[in-house]
Image (cartoon, grey):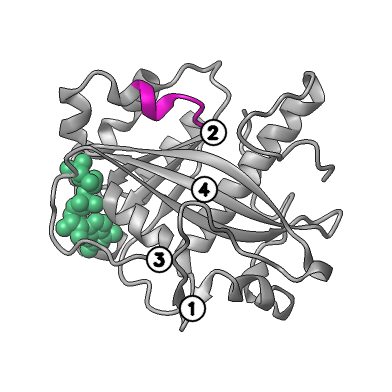
């Protein structure tokens, strides 16, 4: 599926506009991200009603590239300072409010992130199938400080997914803050984006205050998932077990 340019469906940088303040205040607490229980969700006053659309997102990449750190970064949790191999599978949820451009409608996206340690993935055969079951998007990670992880991307993408799979694929380069030690050049990235038609996002460093680079990634995820559902809804009879995206007209 063709990648959607930022801002074609959703208002880019909406998190910076005063209008979004009330929505973002529902996912923040004392300038940090609010923690939601399993069955909790942001509640808006009736005049600002916003539907919640839910998606499953799988984080894939070599051990140590920063899957657990990225999940924590996106969820606003503390990031691991040192590498503890994730011994099994962990999930966490991220709410992210957006505004649709044409209708002016606001929505809360809920991304359920699935993070599986790479060695557990290799050891237990059932891990990959359960991560892939009903998955809506996959983030393929590589680290800017590990050229091998970048070179392995193409392999990984063709091994885990089929071209016919209905899912959004995005690539995330981690440890961009350590660019002094980078093993991957800008022209490597440009070439990869051209060949695969998939955008590469760069993350790294502190997320102190504001949403910084994660807003780009969360918006892109939301926008492409929404687009994917709209395309699917226009070509088939809708039946959406996991979420209520497509029956809402953009
Ligand atoms: N400087 C910097 N360090 C990072 C970044 N992302 C991850 N790290 C560090 O890289 C190490 C490994 O990160 P993890 O998130 O634990 O790696 P993982 O992909 O979950 O690894 P497995 O669970 O073994 O599959 C940790 O020490 C993190 O602090 C980043 O963007 N910048
Ligand atoms: Mg991990």
Tell me: residue 163, above or below residue 17.
above
Residue 5: x and y in percent read 65, 47
Is the residue marked 2 within 8 Å of ligand 1, measured from its CB?
A: no
The earlier-in-sequence mark between 4 and 2 is: 4
Q: Which mark is residue 76?
A: 3
The earlier-in-sequence mark between 2 and 1 is: 1
Q: Residue 138, located in which quarter of the rendered image?
A: top left
The earlier-in-sequence mark between 1 and 4 is: 1
Question: Which residue corresponds to mark 1?
Answer: 29
Tell me: residue 40, above or below residue 130.
below
The answer to whether mark 1 and mark 3 are in CB contact below 8 A is no
Give how far apart the Cα atoms at labels 1 and 3 are.
11 Å
The reply to whether residue 117 is in sight is yes
Question: Which residue corresponds to mark 4?
Answer: 111
Give the quarter of the figure containing the N terminus.
Answer: top right
Residue at left offset 32%, top offset 72%: 206
Dot 2 falls on a residue whose secondary structure is loop
The reply to whether residue 147 is in sight is no
């Amino acid at each position: 599926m063709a990648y959607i340019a930022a801002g074609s469906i959703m208002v880019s940088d909406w998190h910076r506009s005063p209008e979004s303040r009330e929505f973002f205040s529902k996912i923040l607490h004392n300038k940090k991200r609010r923690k939601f229980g399993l069955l909790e969700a942001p509640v808006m006053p009736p005049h600002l009603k916003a539907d919640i659309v839910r998606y499953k997102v799988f984080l894939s990449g070599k051990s140590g590239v920063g899957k657990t750190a990225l999940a924590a970064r996106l969820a606003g949790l503390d990031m691991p300072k040192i590498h503890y191999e994730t011994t099994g599978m962990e999930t966490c949820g991220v709410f992210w409010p957006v505004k649709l451009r044409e209708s002016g409608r606001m929505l809360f996206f809920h991304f359920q992130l699935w993070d599986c340690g790479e060695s557990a993935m290799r050891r237990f055969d059932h891990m990959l199938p359960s991560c892939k079951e009903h998955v809506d998007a996959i983030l393929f990670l590589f680290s800017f400080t590990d050229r091998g992880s970048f070179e392995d991307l193409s392999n990984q993408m063709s091994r885990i997914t089929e071209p016919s799979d209905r899912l959004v694929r995005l690539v995330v380069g981690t440890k961009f803050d350590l660019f002094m030690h980078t093993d991957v050049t800008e022209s490597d990235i440009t070439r990869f984006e051209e060949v695969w038609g998939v955008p590469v996002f760069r993350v790294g460093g502190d997320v102190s205050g504001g949403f910084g680079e994660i807003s780009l990634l969360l918006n892109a995820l939301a926008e492409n998932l929404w687009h994917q559902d709209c395309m699917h809804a226009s070509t088939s009879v809708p039946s959406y077990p996991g979420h209520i995206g497509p029956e809402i007209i953009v």
